[in-house]
Image (tube, grey):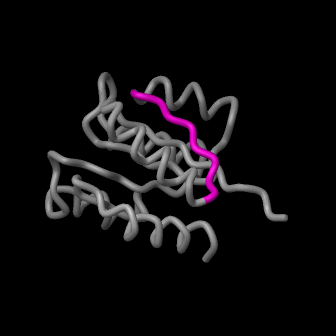
Amino acid sequence: MQNKKNILVIDDEPDIRDLLKDHLEDNNFTVNVVDDGAEALEFMERNIPDLVITDLLLPGEHGIDLIKIIKEKFFLPVIVISGIYRTKEVTHVIKEDLIEAFFEKPLNLDTMLEKINLILNG
């Protein structure tokens, strides 16, 4: 049996964290959740996930700065979610190949799940 893929969700909204955790665990992923960038980096020092899903507006460090650190230090695929920013506002991040996908809130969980599977399974 194949090992479950591990996903780290970074979002300061408990409802979003719970929604993603429940949906992804229902689809056979192992999910850890944290609510800010510092906690995420601390977590990744101990447990490297297979994929990171992060909001852009986080307490402390901005999501884009966090993504750059994740890419430079851990070389992980990153999916961005945001209710404030829109696709056109993060186009530069997408063009710089810093993220694998962007989803606006409210999230389409089925579309996101398809993208996650594509990223993790080729």
Residue 15 locus on image (x, y percent): 32, 36
**Residue shown at 53% from the left, 43% from the top:** 8
Question: Is 109 or 101 nearer to us in this picture?
Answer: 109
From the viewer's perspective, is 32 left or right of 1? left
Quadrant of the snapshot with the N terminus: bottom right
Query: Given the current orientation, which residue lies at the most extreme bottom position?
Result: 122
Above or below, comparing residue 21 to residue 46 in the picture: below
Q: Quadrant location of residue 19?
A: top left
Q: Main secondary structure of the magenta part?
A: strand
Residue 60 locus on image (x, y percent): 31, 22
Q: Quadrant location of residue 95?
A: bottom left
Residue 31 is inside the magenta segment: yes
Question: Is 36 or 75 nearer to us in this picture?
Answer: 36
Residue 87 is inside the magenta segment: no
Residue 61 locus on image (x, y percent): 33, 28
Above or below, comparing residue 121 to residue 85 in the picture: below
**Residue shown at 53% from the left, 46% from the top:** 72
**Residue shown at 47% from the left, 53% from the top:** 23
Count of labels shown?
0
Query: Given the current orientation, which residue lies at the most extreme right position?
Result: 1
**Residue shown at 40% from the left, 68% from the top:** 110
Q: Which residues are magenta?
A: 28-35
Quadrant of the snapshot with the C terminus: bottom right
Residue 94 locus on image (x, y percent): 32, 63
From the viewer's perspective, is 99 left or right of 30? left
